[in-house]
Every structure is written in C-alpha cells, then in structure tokens.
Image (cartoon, rainbow, N blue to C red):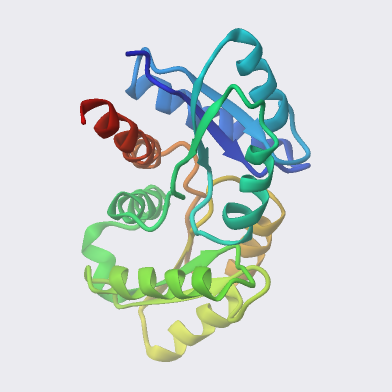
Amino acid sequence: MRRPVLLVIAHGSRDPRHAATVHALVEQVRSLRPGLRVETGFLDFNVPSVHGVLQSLAAEGVRDVVALPLLLTRAFHAKADIPAVLRDAPARLRIRQADVLGPSPLLLSALERRLYEAGLSPADKSSTGVVLASAGSSDPEAIAVIADIAREWWHTGWCAVRPAFASASLPRTEDAVRELRALGCERVAVAPYVLAPGFLPDRIARGAAGADVLAEVLGPAPEVARVVLERYTDACRPAVAALGA
C-alpha cells in the first residue's frame, strides 16, 4: 500500500528567513523517513501555495494526502483557514488533516536544546527563570495550552517558568522578564515557542533585551521533525485500521 503524501502547511511570511526555516525542517523530516514523500505549501506570502500543491498532486494521480498544519497550537489557522483551503481541494484527493504539533514532550526537549545551545546548562535550571514566549492568539484554548505547557515545564526543575505573548494576549515578554527578576531568579532566559523567524519572533527578541539568555526559535530541531512524523503517523492510523477491519 502506497503511503499518503505528507503535505506540511506553513503560514508563510514576507521575511525570507521564515520559508528558509520551514524548508530546512522539511528536509529534516525527509532525512528521518526516507521514502516518504513530503511536500510543502504556504497559506500566504510564499510559494508554492497549498492550493497549488494540491492541484499538482491531483494532476499526478495522487489519491491520499495527510495535511499537517505547521502550528504549535490549535487556534484560528488550524480551525478555520486550513480546513477552508482543504475543502477547496480537487475532489479526487482524499485528505486527512493531522493535528497541530503542540503540546508534546518532544517540543519541551527542543526548547531545552535551544536554551543549552544559547549558553545554559542543566546545572543552571534551579536558578534560572524561563519566559516561554509564544506568538500569541485571541483563541482562549490556545492561550490556556501555553499556560499549561509553562506549568509542566516548571515541574522539570526550572526556578520558574512564565508564559508570554508577542501579540493578542498579555503578558508581553518584557513583562515576564521583569516578573522573574522580581521573583529573585539568578538569571532569566527567554525561550521562543515559535517555529520560524519573522515579525512576531523579532518582537519577542526585542522584549528579551533585559534577559540574560535568548534562545533561537525551534526551527529544524530534530525533536520538531519527530513530532511532525508522529502527527503524520497518527493521522494515517484510522485508514490503516479500516483496511484491516
């Protein structure tokens, strides 16, 4: 049985670093699963568009596609934008929308990887407060998920972990940095919970000016690539079960 094509759907950005990072992550996914066809489509700003990729796949005779939102929380893009684009796909395609990437223990591992690459070590955890800085959303479910992740991460040994948002919600990164200073943490680190550079990650970086450490975005971390493949596998399971019934 031919495996469904994995279509990774990214938001897109005018910032060229965004698309470059998405393509690097997709290459990481391909390296972990040789033989799996992985395509990339963008909702806006970049090419190829999701619509264009779906049209090309249908023209080639592809039947099964798993569409995976390259998103960390289930907010507006995952609930509205992407389903709308997929409903417009050629009728011959059977499309399953995979779940968003977060939350996942692997993403917490990727966040720690980025902090250690920025200069921290596991020995610093108990004396370091961390700002979990996300893009932000007007969706209460997405905001609650970020708060839950911050609480979960704090229980792994950090002095404190506070959520922050670059848009739509409060607190901002700089406010969370000040709060951790007031708590008495010896050092403060900012961990961007975002996948690729762009306008909002740059805002997070500006808000981190008062911190001791600023980590890089998650980008093509191997842990992120593994989550992508986990979501793909999960999306394929119902079809496999039906065939075996």
Q: In which quarter of the image is residue 158?
A: bottom left
Image quadrant in which the C terminus is located: top left
| In the rendered image, the vertical position of residue 120 relative to residue 244, given as above or below | below
Give me the residue at 23% from left, 59% from top: 122
Nearer to me, 51 or 16: 51
- How far across and how far down the image is residue 20, in percent? 62, 31
Give me the residue at 73% from left, 43% from top: 13
Q: Quadrant of residue 16?
A: top right
Residue 18 showing in the rendered view = yes
User: Residue extending furthest bottom?
Assistant: 182
User: Residue extending furthest front?
Assistant: 245
- How far across and how far down the image is residue 170, in percent? 60, 81
Image quadrant in which the N terminus is located: top left
Count of marks overlaid on the render: 0
233 horizontally vs 215: left or right: left
Give me the residue at 61% from left, 17% from top: 57
Nearer to me, 51 or 185: 51
| In the rendered image, the vertical position of residue 232 relative to residue 198, given as above or below | above
Nearer to me, 36 or 117: 36
194 horizontally vs 2: left or right: right
| In the rendered image, the vertical position of residue 94 relative to residue 12, given as above or below | above
- How far across and how far down the image is residue 242, in percent? 28, 32
- How far across and how far down the image is residue 128, in percent? 34, 72
209 horizontally vs 16: left or right: left
Residue 49 showing in the rendered view = no
49 horizontally vs 114: left or right: right
| In the rendered image, the vertical position of residue 60 relative to residue 244, given as above or below | above
Give me the residue at 57% from left, 28% from top: 23
